[in-house]
Image (cartoon, helix red, strand yellow):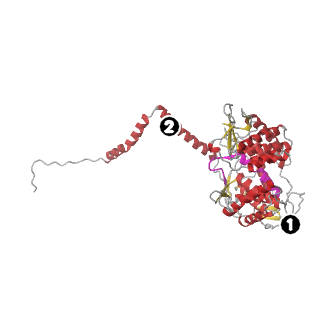
């Protein structure tokens, strides 16, 4: 049918599916071969650097993950059917005997789980807090154990790590602190402060009023004022500036400002907020201020708020070791380690005892004092370097982080300060607090104290790598030490502490006086050799002043105990 001329050929192609996939795979493997070829082209040194960087990243990830992985979770979830600690068990717990009260005691209940005694004043010039203080009922009981856990004797928490080694240190009976049996009641009507009486005082009060007016206009009820932009900033959403200033307003005689702030506390301050807060910061700034304001004013509103807050902070102490977690959600009462590290700061976990102990003494509930006393007892038994402590401690294991920095500056400072102040607060009856303080100061004078080569300035440095390397760096925070030393000498500590305090305070003053603004930097470095013209130098990143109070507090202590008005004049120059 079809006419054909010449030869006709048809080309047929045999297709093997497996072979086609193989060809595709070969094409896909070409980039891999190119990467491998490039890797082989690298020098031995370049490959070594790459290997080192890879292993460094792996080690860092393991370091951050492993400590917190020893426990199923680093957060504490409160069971809806908890087993309660003895001080929160059902039924009204009577106050200890032989309590002398100047005002009537009224029962105050924190829902069905918490029954306390709250001191209220009958003074006619005070607005009394409600007789009943209630917390949200949905599983918000302060510091509860999960169902099925056994309550153990004080100081005998038996927790084991992965190697089966006991983590909780047994506290000997001789160290166990007995809470005070006396409820502290402020004077009826509080303490009256007449206000400034000389020109310097008037200038300070005027400066306070100026700052307060700016906060009131631009950031009222918020945590902080941004003075340049005239806006507000919130950290914990607790009105930190307002709460922190309550006792200051009273002492300086700014009574109208205080009453306005009190109204805000009464109407607006709520701790039932779904937000993580730092145990240390909230304790010293909010709990401490509420308690001091209660004692200065006699107004039970502030005590009731303090009890509410204290109960919400107690879940921090439910870690396996008893060393508190650093953060807690005030609404859910779930506690956990900081997001940036598995460890808590040593100074933070040992700088909450004064406030919690005072809360027990004011409320009649010993649980707050007992809880923080266990932390002090635990830290007392840990190994130290001539009384000096590393700046990080793990809440799960209860151990210091190996090779941590040793410093009397950030994250280490107030551990030593609170040893002394706890000893004083407890009537100078707990010997290990005094002994640890003396040993720590002795270790600091031996291992951390240095003098500059040219002007012989006394300063306190740091030990890096767990105590191996000395660094001539002193935080402004370290300037709390002269005042603490003077306070200790007043209570019978070694006399040589006062000479050391005087010399160190002079150096702290020089960190101000040698700056063009007469404001100290956050961190100061000191020369180790005598070849430089100045003993003191400041790095660019540290050339800022955070308005820290430590040096001013030390000036006050030194003036108070010595009567030397030079310290007053130094403070006035800084104020100006």
Q: Is residue 341 magenta?
A: yes
Q: Is the C-beta separation of discs 2 and 1 under 8 Å?
A: no
Q: Which mark is residue 123?
A: 1
Looking at the image, residue 14 lies above or below residue 111: above
Query: What residue is pinned by disc 2?
Result: 50
Figure quadrant of residue 98:
bottom right
**Closer-to-camera residue (489/174):** 489
Judge whether residue 375 can be spotted in this image. Answer: no
Few, some or many C-alpha atoms within 10 Å of disc 1 (few <14, some 14-19, many ≥20)? some
The residue mark sitting in front, 2 or 1, is 1
Q: Quadrant of the N terminus?
A: bottom left
Looking at the image, residue 518 lies above or below residue 367: above
Q: Is residue 196 left or right of residue 18?
A: right
The stretch in magenta equals 335-363
Residue 221: percent from left, percent from top: 69, 62
Figure quadrant of residue 219:
bottom right
Q: Is residue 379 magenta?
A: no
Q: Which mark is residue 89?
A: none
Of the two numbered discs 2 and 1 on the same chain, state the one appearing first in sequence: 2
Cα distance between the residues tagged 2 and 1: 74 Å
């Amino acid at each position: 049918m079809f006419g054909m001329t010449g030869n006709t050929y048809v080309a047929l192609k045999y297709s093997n599916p497996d072979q086609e996939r193989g060809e595709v795979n070969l094409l896909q493997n070409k980039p891999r071969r190119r990467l491998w070829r490039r890797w082989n082209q690298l020098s031995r040194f370049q490959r070594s650097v790459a290997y080192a960087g890879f292993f460094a990243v792996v080690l860092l990830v393991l370091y951050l993950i492993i400590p917190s992985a020893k426990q199923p979770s680093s957060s504490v979830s409160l069971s809806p059917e908890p087993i309660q600690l003895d001080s929160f068990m059902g039924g009204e717990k009577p106050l200890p005997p032989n309590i002398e009260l100047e005002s009537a005691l009224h029962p105050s209940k924190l829902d069905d789980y918490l029954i306390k005694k709250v001191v209220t004043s009958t003074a006619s010039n005070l607005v009394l807090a409600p007789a009943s203080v209630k917390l949200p009922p949905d599983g918000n009981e302060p510091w509860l154990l999960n169902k099925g856990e056994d309550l153990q004797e004080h100081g005998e928490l038996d927790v084991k790590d992965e190697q089966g080694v006991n983590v909780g240190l047994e506290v000997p009976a001789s160290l166990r602190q007995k809470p005070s049996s006396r409820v502290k009641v402020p004077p009826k009507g509080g303490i009256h402060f007449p206000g400034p009486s000389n020109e310097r005082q008037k200038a300070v009060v005027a400066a306070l009023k100026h700052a307060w007016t700016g906060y009131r206009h631009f950031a009222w009820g918020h945590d902080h004022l941004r003075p340049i932009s005239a806006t507000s900033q919130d950290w914990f959403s607790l009105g930190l500036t307002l709460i922190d200033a309550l006792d200051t307003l009273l002492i300086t005689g700014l009574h109208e400002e205080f009453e306005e702030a009190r109204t805000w506390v009464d109407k607006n301050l709520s701790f039932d907020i779904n937000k993580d807060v730092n145990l240390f910061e909230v304790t010293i700034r909010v709990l401490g201020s509420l308690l001091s304001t209660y004692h200065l004013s006699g107004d039970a509103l502030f005590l009731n708020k303090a009890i509410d807050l204290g109960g919400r902070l107690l879940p921090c102490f439910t870690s396996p070791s008893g060393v508190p977690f650093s953060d807690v959600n005030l609404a859910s009462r779930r506690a956990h380690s900081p997001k940036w590290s598995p460890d808590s700061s040593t100074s933070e976990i040992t700088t909450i005892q004064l406030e919690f102990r005072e809360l027990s003494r004011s409320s009649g509930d010993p649980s707050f004092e007992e809880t923080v006393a266990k932390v002090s007892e635990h830290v007392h038994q840990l190994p130290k370097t001539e009384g000096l402590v590393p700046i990080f401690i793990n809440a799960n294991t209860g151990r210091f982080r190996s090779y941590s920095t040793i410093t009397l500056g950030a994250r280490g400072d107030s551990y030593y300060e609170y040893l002394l102040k706890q000893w004083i607060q407890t009537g100078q009856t707990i010997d290990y607090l005094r002994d640890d303080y003396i040993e720590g100061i002795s270790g600091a004078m031996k291992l951390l104290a240095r003098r500059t080569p040219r002007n012989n300035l006394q300063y306190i440095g740091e030990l890096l790598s767990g105590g191996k390397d000395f660094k001539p760096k002193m935080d402004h925070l370290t300037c709390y030490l002269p005042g603490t030393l003077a306070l200790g000498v007043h209570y019978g500590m070694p006399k040589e502490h006062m000479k050391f305090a005087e010399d160190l305070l002079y150096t702290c003053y020089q960190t101000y006086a040698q700056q063009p603004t007469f404001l100290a930097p956050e961190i100061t470095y000191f020369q180790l050799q005598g070849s430089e013209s100045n003993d003191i130098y400041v790095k660019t990143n540290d050339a800022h002043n955070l308005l820290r109070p430590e040096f001013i507090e030390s000036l006050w202590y030194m003036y108070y105990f010595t009567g030397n008005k030079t310290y007053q004049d130094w403070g006035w120059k800084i104020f100006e």
